[in-house]
Amino acid sequence: MLDYHLHLWPHSQTEAETTVEQVSAYCARAAAAGVTEIAVTEHLFRFTQAKDLLGGFWDDCPGDALRPGMSAYWDHHARVDLDDYVEVVQAVKAEGLPVVLGLEVDFYQGRMDQVARLLADYPFDVLLGSVHWLGAWRFDVLDEPKTLAEWDVRRIDQVWEEYTRAMEELAASGACDVLAHPDLVKIAGRVPAVPDEFYDRITEAAARSGMAAELSSAGWRKPFGEEYPAPPLLARFVDRGVPLTTASDAHALPDVADRVDDLRDLLVRAGVPRLQGYRERRPYPVPVTSAGGVRS
Ligand SMILES: [Zn+2]
Ligand SMILES: [Zn+2]
């Protein structure tokens, strides 16, 4: 099993430092839970290099009311040096611990080429692609009145349409390897009566691009209490042969490898014998049932 989606710092923390001790502790906790390899995948927007490249992208987005919130979010988060992060994770990997270097990358409409050029300068093993925002709207932030209020003014079908289009463009960009929390748009508990078209399109986008999709326990820690992706979307991925990773999306040590046994049960029930790991952005198979760092 894998835990291929891990953050080092909670969102509440602004200044942050990457340390060998913390990455090593993540490895130890994951190994104790039967995870054979982890990927540290901090948000790209944590890093000053991202702010230099992408800061202000929200000025081109519709929605005057939402831009200040996005600007403040970047001010709060984008304070860490990407080179330090890369160096520390690589050092832990060089010690032989079962960790690979990753990053969680947001979709930036029309700018994924620039993002890919920035990231090409670093030795990443795996890049997660995520849609957390539609324009300047951080739709997954449910504790801020302005972002939450948007859910009441927009039609659900329209939100899912926009989200799905962003996922399609993200996949087509080829900038990333794994679609993270593929149906994150359900986060507020608002799901169209018939979401099939959206599930079909997300599956098609993954299959066409050759990306893997993530099976994540993080949804079980949200109010709606369902894994990502929903069962009908997971079934489509499996039918279409989209490779899978498993993930906790932990933002602190206690959630590392969260409910990995439950994720394994879902995979076994779905008839999935192997996951997909990555080294230097090249995939390799990882048996679902193995433990102890076996690579095949
Ligand atoms: Zn995410
Ligand atoms: Zn994440």
Image (tube, grey):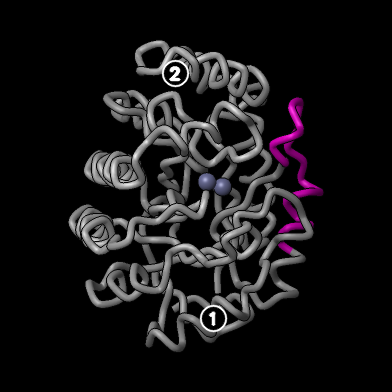
Disc 1 to disc 2, how far (Cα)? 37 Å
> As displayed, is residue 262 above or below residue 254?
below
Three-letter residue code for mark 2: Leu
Q: Nearer the viewer, residue 239 or 38?
A: 239
- What residue appears at the point 30 percent right and 47 percent down from the top-left corner? 157
Residue at left 62%, top 57%? 222
Q: Nearer the viewer, residue 242 or 274?
A: 242
Q: Work out whether 52 lies above or below 241.
A: above
Q: Which residue is mark 1?
A: 264
Q: Secondary structure at mark 1?
A: helix
Q: Nearer the viewer, residue 215 or 34?
A: 215
Asked whether residue 174 is in view, the answer is: no
Q: Residue furthest front?
A: 152
Within the magenta stretch, is there residue 141?
Answer: no
The earlier-in-sequence mark between 1 and 2 is 2
Residue 54: numbered disc = 2
Which mark is on residue 256?
none
* Position of residue 262 measured from the top left corner of the image (x, y, whole percent): 59, 79
Q: Are marks 1 and 2 in contact (CB under 8 Å)?
A: no
Is disc 1 surrounded by few (<14), some (14 to 19) or many (20+) residues within 10 Å? some
Q: Can residue 13 be found in the magenta stretch?
A: yes
Amino acid type, residue under disc 1 in the picture: Arg
Image-quadrant location for residue 264: bottom right
